[in-house]
Image (cartoon, rainbow, N blue to C red):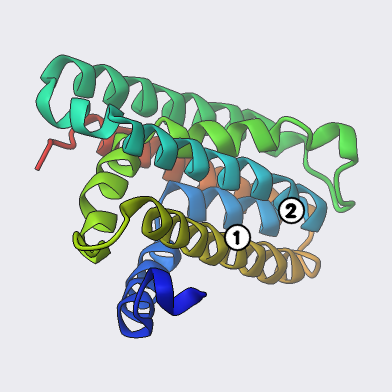
Amino acid sequence: MFTDVMSLEVWLSFAAASLLLVISPGPAVALMVSTGLSRGRRAALSLIPGYFFGDLVAMVLSFAGLGALLMTSAKLFVLLKWLGALYLVYLGWRMWREARQLGDAEPTVNGTRHLGAQAFLVSVLNPKSLLFFLAFMPQFIDPTTAAIPQLILLGLTFLGLGLFNDLAYALLSSSGGQMLRAPTRRLIHRTGAVCMVGAGLATAVIRRQ
């Protein structure tokens, strides 16, 4: 049963803290909102599987030891940091170029298939994700009971909240985007591109805590 794994009070505290984290602005939110407003619902929804599996992979890698390795290996941290930063800058450049192709109609499925892969890479190439799962989740683990069931429960909770958050952002942003004409869609997409470049530059200067 649920209470055999973790107390309800601890779980609610974790859920509340996780909800605040997943709704906070960042590269993932910027990409989702920009895509929903400029390209429509189908494009925004196509990002969700990428975010979900990106978070899942980051979580598993962190628990498997990569997060601890990042905390002790400066070279590995810098390598992953620069990979993530360069990808965000590249993604911003690509979004800027895509903006001129946007029209009043919602893009076709063929035009959105790559977005899931983009979302996955945005999530999994973020060194802060690995460090977050390593530093944040253990605070809610009771060392007197089995850790694995607790980690699974916390992981599923975080992924579920992230999924709900991504779905809400996708539906809200795409609903607003339906009222926009092509010039405004292009402007929003380019604003999102600038945000991605800014996020890449911010990633490049982050330091291990």
Residue type, numbered disc 1: Leu
Residue type, numbered disc 2: Leu
Secondary-structure class at tag 2: helix
Secondary-structure class at tag 1: helix
Q: Earlier in the sequence, mark 1 or mark 2?
A: 2
**Is residue 133 left or right of 163 when viewed as pictured?**
left
Q: Which mark is residue 45?
A: 2
Crowding around mark 1 (Cα neighbors within 10 Å: few <14, some 14 to 19, many 20+) is some
Percent x, y of residue 189: 61, 47
**Is residue 31 left or right of 35 when viewed as pictured?**
left
Residue displayed at 41% across by 42% down: 59
Q: Mark 1 points at which residue?
A: 163
Instruction: Report the residue that reaches farthest toward the bottom.
Output: 9
Residue displayed at 25% across by 29% down: 204
- Closest to the observer: 88 or 184? 88
- Closest to the observer: 86 or 147? 147
Q: Residue 8 carries which label?
A: none
Tell me: residue 151, above or below residue 74: below
- Closest to the observer: 188 or 200? 200
